[in-house]
Image (cartoon, rainbow, N blue to C red):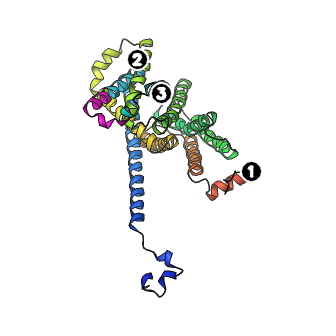
Amino acid sequence: LGTPPIASLPNARHHPRREAWAWPTFSRMAVDRATLLDCAKKLAICLAYIAVSTALIRFNKYLMDEGRFPFSMALTAMHMTVSSVFCLVGYFVKPQAFPGMESTAGKRLTVLKWFVPIGIAFAISLYTSNQAYIYCNVTFLQFLKEGNVVITFLMSVAAGLQVMTRLRASNIVWVITGSCLAVSGEVHFMWIGFFFQVVSQFAECSRAVMGEHVLTGAGLKLDPLSYTMFISPTCLVVLLVGNLLEWNPDIPKAFSEWWPVLLPNACMAFLLNLLVATVIKEISAVGFILTGVVKDIVVVLFSAVVMGETVSVSQAFGFALTLAGVFFWSLAKVDPDNSVVRRAEWLLGDQRKEAAA
């Protein structure tokens, strides 16, 4: 305050502090505003994903009760049926909302090559995830999901997309240790539920990695609606085969009784599919997994506080340890030059290859 503008100072053109006093240009202000709007948009997408995913998890858990609709394969098939119908109707009503359909014209074999494995992984993920609700409570399943960051990274290493270092290996041990503590503290542990959940996580991480490549690379230029339109029928075919193999004659009776509840559940699943594709496209597969970590925290708190599910002391400690490990993983990913990350690398003897000047 009280300092005259640079322009009024003698020899202002050569004043050494001219740059420090320069007023922001309209172009800089426009860039900053655009950046803030982009960040706000991505934050809103992530919050919407967290809210819808949390609601659907509790909704599915409610439906999978023995006295309601405990048919995970049929439930996921309904989800994909509604998604397919909504996408087809939307495409015929407003095809311009599906720009990916036009950009993939003449590339359908390439599309098929990617969406067959993605659809299979998605179907496995949906079925096994819902099946796990029969045997385990939601809180325990969310503890297990903290390992998704590690699974995704290991898959990327196997594909040659990432490099294993001592720091990353130590971080993996850190996350696994916390997850093991959380799992070992489960009062009502069941191996079958644990198995279903682990299979679901491997399938989900595979889908996320392949989905990122399709949405951001592979020359397909797919948007979330076109992505959902391709993946829903592919996944539905896999689920229909599964339903034929394990058909239960009680399904029609249960459906006739619970369809008023199943329909909004399927609509919510369609909305979640769109949000998943949007998060992966706007942020990345790793960003999707990290957003899932925040969602897991919300689900655990809601399940423990509101739904009254039991959380032991060792589980709470293991969950906190795992979250700390995932946070450090995120820090090393987003800000590799952070002093904490650099110190950890030095302690572990990691020699980082600096980029040539």
Element type at mark 1: loop
Q: Is tag 2's residue or tag 3's residue first in the polypeptide sequence?
A: 3
Quadrant of res 24: bottom left
Disc 2 crowd rating (10 Å Cα; few below 14, some 14-19, many 20+) is some
Apparent side of residue 171 relative to residue 288 in the rendered image (left or right): right
Q: Is residue 48 magenta?
A: no
- Give the farthest residue toward the right: 349
- Which stretch is magenta? 85-100
Q: In the rendered structure, which amino acid carries the disc numbered 1?
A: Gly
Q: Which residue is drawn at 42% across and 61% down?
A: 32
Q: How far apart are marks 2 and 1 (CA)?
A: 52 Å
Circle on res. 240: 2
Foreground pick, 52 / 67: 52
SS assignment for the magenta stretch, majority: helix
Residue 103 can be seen, yes or no? yes
Q: In the rendered structure, which amino acid carries the disc numbered 3?
A: Thr
Which quadrant, please, contains the N terminus?
bottom left
- Give the farthest residue toward the left: 93
Where residue 93 appears, as percent x and y from the top left, is 25, 32
Give the residue pinned by disc 1.
Answer: 349
Q: How far apart are marks 3 and 1 (CA)?
A: 44 Å
Q: In the rendered structure, which amino acid carries the disc numbered 2?
A: Leu
Element type at mark 3: helix
Q: Is residue 88 magenta?
A: yes
Element type at mark 2: helix
Residue 307 can be seen, yes or no? no
In the rendered image, the vertical position of residue 337 relative to residue 264, given as above or below: below
Circle on res. 18: none
Foreground pick, 214 / 10: 10
Give the residue pinned by disc 3.
Answer: 110
Q: Nearer the viewer, mark 3 or mark 1?
A: 3
Apparent side of residue 34 relative to residue 117 in the rendered image (left or right): left
